[in-house]
Image (tube, rainbow, N blue to C red):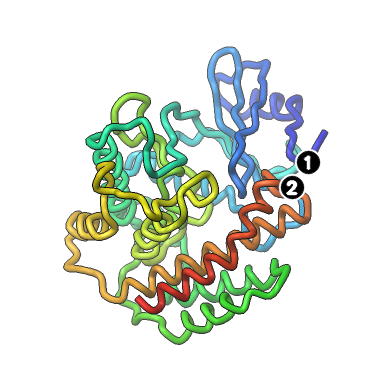
Amino acid sequence: MSEQALDTGQLERWAKTHVTGFSGPLSVNKFGGGQSNPTYQIKTPDRSYVLRRKPPGVLLKSAHAVDREFRVQSALTHSKVPVARMIAFCEDDGIIGSAFYLMEEVTGRIFDDPRLPGCSPDERGSIIAAMNSTLAAVHEVDVETAGLSDFGPSGHYYKRQTDRWSKQYHATQTEDVPDLETLMGWLQKNMPADDGQRTLVHGDYRLDNLIFSSKGESLLAVLDWELSTIGHPFADLASVIMQWSMPTGAEGRGLAGVDRAALGLWSDQRFIVEYCERRDIAGIENFGFYLAFCHFRMAAILQGVKKRALDGNASDPERGLRLGRYVPEFAMAGLEATRK
């Protein structure tokens, strides 16, 4: 059995004790594409579940926090942010080799390509509108009422995050990337003043982490909350804009060079303006800093993906190595953002 495979016998015995109404036998199908917490479809004769687990092997401190994923999605169950229903969490590494949780399987459409092939211009506009309104809803969650006031430390979010991801990058570094070192130094010297905004942030908000209805444009669930915390909302907003600046295709998943107006897709400016209107914000100064920060953080994340692939404990090692080649490109794009 590979490290990524599940001990179905152990899992079934655990589920019969901890999951109301569970009835085996179960079968397992590993979802491809993810680079962080391995994710599986668990099927039984009666229903389907989704299992998210920590990867096996030695991990960086605070990385792959499936317990935090389970907690935040549980807290959002009755909010305006659509999430899958959480079912059970297991912190016992002895069951399948690492901590994991079960959630309901939400069936619908996941768009890997932000050009939204196969959709009409009107459908594309509605899908991006739902993406925009849901992002605003994430940032409007009352963290006190949701029980998430302690979900992230206090203090300057960007200082904290820049320090954290700089350490993570250096802990997984495999070669020198001078542009990234320059970018980290620029971020430290150009931190915006703390404006007091302290909201729930997703940490990796992009189109392929959203599930839409099979027919129509309703947003059914926001996935992959591993990087969520209490922090500053503009990082999520800039993350969307950063992703769209990437090349088109399976690896970049961006919109670089695309005639968005012809496809019915929103411009960066429209996405930002409508987000601000939904949150009653007059505007955003120095947006280049937030873009630069997001490029830096993505470079650090992809460096960790590459290191796990080299160490043999990535969810998809071959793709992990391909993604790792983008680290210098994100560093270069981050430096470009500092000049905007």
Compared with 264, 21 (above or below) is: above
What kind of element bears circle 2?
A: loop
Label 1–label 2 contact, CB within 8 A: yes
Examine the image and state in which quarter residue 179 appears. Answer: bottom right
Look at the image and tell me in which quarter the N terminus lies.
top right
Residue closest to the far top: 45
Q: Is residue 165 left or right of residue 317?
A: left
Q: Nearer the viewer, residue 277 or 147?
A: 277
Compared with 122, 258 (above or below) is: below
Report the amino acid beneath label 2.
Pro
Q: Nearer the viewer, residue 244 or 163?
A: 244
Q: Position of residue 294 (x, y in %)?
A: 45, 65
- Disc number placed over residue 323 in the picture, else none: none
Q: Is residue 116 left or right of residue 48?
A: left
Compared with 6, 271 (above or below) is: below
**Upstream in sequence: badge 1 or badge 2:** 1
Q: Residue at image x 35%, y 50%?
A: 258
Examine the image and state in which quarter residue 121 appears. Answer: top left
Q: Is residue 217 left or right of residue 305?
A: left
Q: Is residue 70 visible?
A: no
Mark 1 sits on what residue?
3
Look at the image and tell me in which quarter the C terminus lies.
bottom left
Examine the image and state in which quarter residue 170 appears. Answer: bottom right
Mark 2 sits on what residue?
56
